[in-house]
Image (spheres, helix red, strand yellow):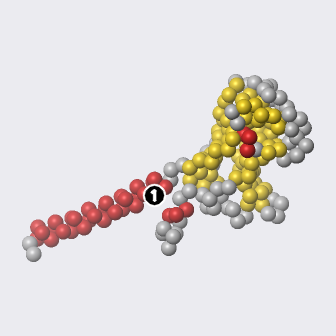
Amino acid sequence: MSRYRLLYRRLRRAAAASAAALLVVASSAAAQGLNYLNVAGTSFRPRDSAVNTNYGGAGCISRGSGVTEFVYPVQLPHASRIRFVRAYFYDTSAKDLTFRLFRHGGEGTGIEDATFTSNTSAGYTIRQSPELDITVDNVSYATELSVLLADASSSLELCGMRIAYIDDTIFENGFGD
């Protein structure tokens, strides 16, 4: 076999190996894309059943009476990673909404992963948590979103929250092997 033909075969094998490596990197990068869990305000329930909820339209709720947090149980794939939480709300009040992402341990412990407030009175607005890197552990924790509406008025409404997360668990152990 000629020296050129041998060199050509080696280059072809190297190119094929490089292409395969690029394909793996591209697949991994695609898996890093964000997924979203969108929750309408009407899906949140008061922690205290004596608290009234008023519907403001378009999925938004306000607190009618009493004082308590409104909560939503989060179900995300085990070992996925939460990147941020975003809140959608209406605020023309002097008081704020307080948004939290919280994990409850089975033995009564808890971890507050993110807390941020509306801190505005600009009408319909969006706020986002700082960037997060929280690994979902459905074995040890129950995760929830919660909102405290500091004013019992239609001038302070929760319209919804969204969790952005990455679910690349199929790559965790070599494609399920």
Give x and y (percent) for residue 6.
15, 71
Name the residue: 31% across, 60% down: 19
Q: Residue 98 sits in which quadrant?
A: top right
Q: Please, is residue 58 above or below residue 171 in the view? A: above
**Does the rendering let one see residue 87?**
yes
Decide if residue 33 is on the left or right side of residue 24: right
Q: Nearer the viewer, residue 129 or 171?
A: 171
Q: Residue 69 sits in which quadrant?
A: top right
Q: Residue 129 sits in which quadrant?
A: top right
> Alpha-carbon neighbours of circle 1 within 10 Å: few (<14), some, or many (≥20)?
few
Q: Nearer the viewer, residue 46 or 87?
A: 46
Give x and y (percent) for residue 61.
76, 35
Tell me the element at label 1.
Answer: helix
Name the residue: 72% across, 31% down: 57
Q: Please, is residue 157 above or below residue 147 in the view? A: above
Give x and y (percent) for residue 124.
68, 28
**Does the rendering let one see residue 150?**
no
**How many labels were placed on the picture?**
1
Decide if residue 67 is on the left or right side of residue 87: right
Name the residue: 88% across, 40% down: 51
Give x and y (percent) for residue 13.
25, 67
Decide if residue 122 is on the left or right side of residue 95: left
Decide if residue 16 is on the left or right side of residue 93: left
Q: Tell me the quarter of the image containing the N terminus.
A: bottom left
| Residue at the extreme left | 2
Name the residue: 28% across, 64% down: 16
Amino acid at the residue labelled 1: Ser
Report the residue marked by disc 1. 28
